[in-house]
Image (spheres, rainbow, N blue to C red):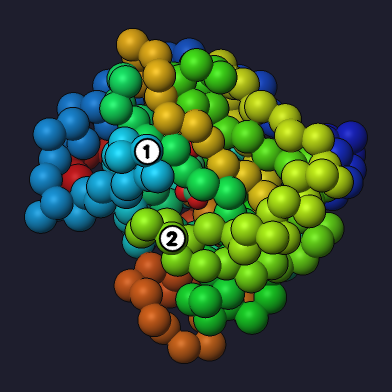
Amino acid sequence: MLSAEQLSQYEAEGFVIIPGLLQPDEVTAFRDRARSDLRGAAESEGLMAKGDTEGNTTLLKMWYRADDSFYGRVARDQRLVDIARQIIGRDTYLYSHKMTMKEPRIGGAWEWHQDYGYWYQNKCLAPDMLSIWLALDDSTRANGCLQVLPRSHRLGRLDHDRVDGQTVVDAEYLAAALERFDLQYVEMDAGDALVFDCNLLHRSDANRSDGPRWGYIASYNAVDNEPFRHVREYGRYEELVPVPAGSFRDADAIPV
Ligand SMILES: O=C(O)CCC(=O)C(=O)O
């Protein structure tokens, strides 16, 4: 659960950082498992490569189910579920979960966007959605940590365009937002989490370092805000049954 102070920071700023949400041994187990499952995974296994404007590529693996797999159990971990339910304030389900992988020197940038820029197009009527971004590596300016515009969630949903394979916020509105809000680099230690509103403007740079920058993102939605029409494979309602903290480590081997 978030403390009252963390919750009011989330509401005011559109995000809050939770230091050490995962214990060091949990991070190690999660990172080792993910590297072994996902490194070398192919497009046929659902791995997506997203280009950026400089020709770099960032990798993305998405999961759609709140199941009993290793990754499903991370998304259903009691600590994450409690935070999501607390913020949404009514029946909540897992919208999607994914790994964003920036490999050393080649991992590309994510351009400015609001997640609700995508999810509105996916037929979610209300912005009653949030994400928890878990750092599996220390996430720094050098390796392409997240950048946010604090308070920009108050703008509501802005228009987005499809540019070079990414859904990015309208350039003119972005320029105005950059004038109005101070950009913040969200540097995190492995195991820290960023909880953020679906309308918070965010991006990340390419990974110019010699180490990987991997982050796992679980996104949650209000049950009554399930897409009114399904245009994507993900986002379908499934009961969100929490599992004890850290029990993902006990999950059996599951296909990636
Ligand atoms: O992991 C990142 O750097 C950004 C990912 C992101 O913004 C997204 O998946 O919407």
Give the image location of residue 138, x and y in percent: 49, 16
* Residue that appears at 54% across and 27% down: 145
Residue flagged by tag 1: what amino acid is it?
Glu
Q: Which mark is residue 189?
A: none
Q: How many labels does the image show?
A: 2
In this rendering, is residue 126 above or below 62? Answer: below
Disc marking residue 163:
2
Mark 2 neighbour density, 10 Å: few (under 14) some (14–19) many (20 or more): few
Question: Which quadrant of the figure has residue 221?
Answer: bottom right
Residue at numbered disc 1 = 54
- The percent coordinates of residue 50 (x first, y second) are 32, 48
Say above or below: 31 vs 14. Answer: above
Is residue 249 shown left or right of residue 42?
A: right
The structure residue drawn at horizontal position 75% and vertical position 45%, both measured from the top left corner, is: 178
Counting residues from the start of the chain, the first of labels 2 and 1 encountered is 1
The answer to whether any part of residue 17 appears in the image is yes
Residue 129 coordinates in the image, percent (x, y): 64, 62
> Local crowd at mark 1 within 10 Å, few (<14), some, or many (≥20)?
few
State the residue at coordinates (72%, 60%): 173
Side of 52 relative to 237 (left or right): left
The yes-or-no answer for disc 2 within 8 Å of ligand 1 is no
Please tell me whether residue 90 is drawn above or below residue 180 in the rendered image.
below
Which percent across, then down, holds residue 227?
Answer: 52, 80
Q: What element carries label 1?
A: loop
Q: In which quarter of the image is the N terminus?
A: top right
Tell me if 136 is positioned left or right of 152 in this view.
left
Q: What residue type is labelled 2?
A: Val
Question: In the image shown, does 252 or 121 lie closer to the viewer?
Answer: 121
